[in-house]
Amino acid sequence: MAAGTLMLLFVAYELWGTGLAESRSQSTLKQDFHKLQVAAPAANDFAPPMPTGSAIAIIKIPRTNTEKTVVQGVGVEDLKKGPGHYPTTPMPGQPGNAAIAGHRTTYGAPFYNLDQLQPNDPILITTLQGSFRYEVIDTKIVSPSQVEVLDNTQDNRLTLTTCHPRFSASQRMVVTARLVGAAAQAPPVDPNAKKKNASDLSLGDEAGLSGGTTARGPAVLWGVAFLAVWALAYGIRRIVGHKWIVWPIALVPMGITLFIFFENFARLLPANV
């Protein structure tokens, strides 16, 4: 019964608790993006590299009533904030295959209804270079290893990726859309800036398909901490015999340790579930 209760609490945290964190991040990111629009560099200026986790665009999908701020990067921490742009692909609106990953069921689930998109449905992207319209041309299901969907292309397109089916990470849904109108040329890059190559990233980081193993230790430690608090409270209740006093007091430290355990355990899951 205790194990079942913990599982239900974790499901509730994943479906609703993570959404609250994403909502706070989106509010801040939207303000940050508007500030960047005001201070956007001239077309001929060098384009500074965008740090991971920073706001780079606004994506709107009318069919699914989706409007989210897109961040740079597809790591676990990046996708907690919102849809993430694959750093080794062109920016949306620029020539080639721009790619964005997003959660399907957690952290606001921006791509929850991605399967509802139909051919010719619009996807609207606003970047610091302007506004762009894409129209859906294809939806397919692939395995997590088929990262060739992120390869650059001769045509100008947008690729959206998310986990499939819902509540699972066994496959990936890939939606492809073509750019309507002319692409915006990428601003010049500072030749002295360090270039980030695809080879610098692992498969999990690049594709946003796997969890972060660095959270394994903290997850175990906070899990043990929660069990220790529970065991201590249980022992005191057995000695004192007044459970109506012990458990209300124990709920605070138990809740804190359990929440931090859930936070770290969730980081072990695929980044765009």
Image (cartoon, grey):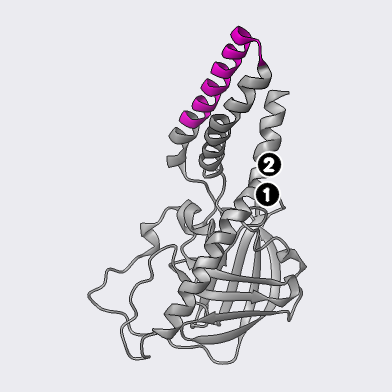
Q: Is residue 239 left or right of residue 95?
A: right
Image: magenta residue range? 221-242
Q: Secondary structure at mark 2?
A: helix
Residue located at (54% from left, 92% from top) = 182
Q: Nearer the viewer, residue 269 or 141?
A: 269
Q: Position of residue 149 (x, y in %)?
A: 57, 66
Element type at mark 1: helix
**How far is disc 1 from disc 2 in space, using C-alphas?**
6 Å
Residue displayed at 63% across by 21% down: 245
Work out whether 21 lies above or below 193: above
Q: Main secondary structure of the magenta part?
A: helix
CA neighbours of label 1 inside 10 A, class few (<14), some (14 to 19), many (20+): some
Q: Is residue 110 magenta?
A: no
Q: Is residue 170 visible in the rendered structure shown here?
A: no
Q: For the image shown, how many numbered marks are present on the structure?
A: 2
Viewer-closest of 169 and 112: 112
Q: Residue at x 26, y 72 (%)?
A: 193
Direction left: furthest residue:
192
From what the image shows, is residue 88 above or below residue 157?
above
Tag 1: residue type? Answer: Leu
Q: Position of residue 161 (x, y in %)?
A: 61, 63
Extreme residue in the top direction: 239
The image shows residue 57 at horizontal and vertical percentages of 51, 75
Q: Residues within 10 Å of mark 2 (few under 14, many from 20)?
A: some
Circle 2 is placed at which residue position?
Answer: 11
**Residue where numbered disc 1 is placed:** 15
Amino acid at the residue labelled 2: Val
Q: Are marks 1 and 2 in contact (CB under 8 Å)?
A: yes
Q: Quadrant of the N terminus?
A: top right
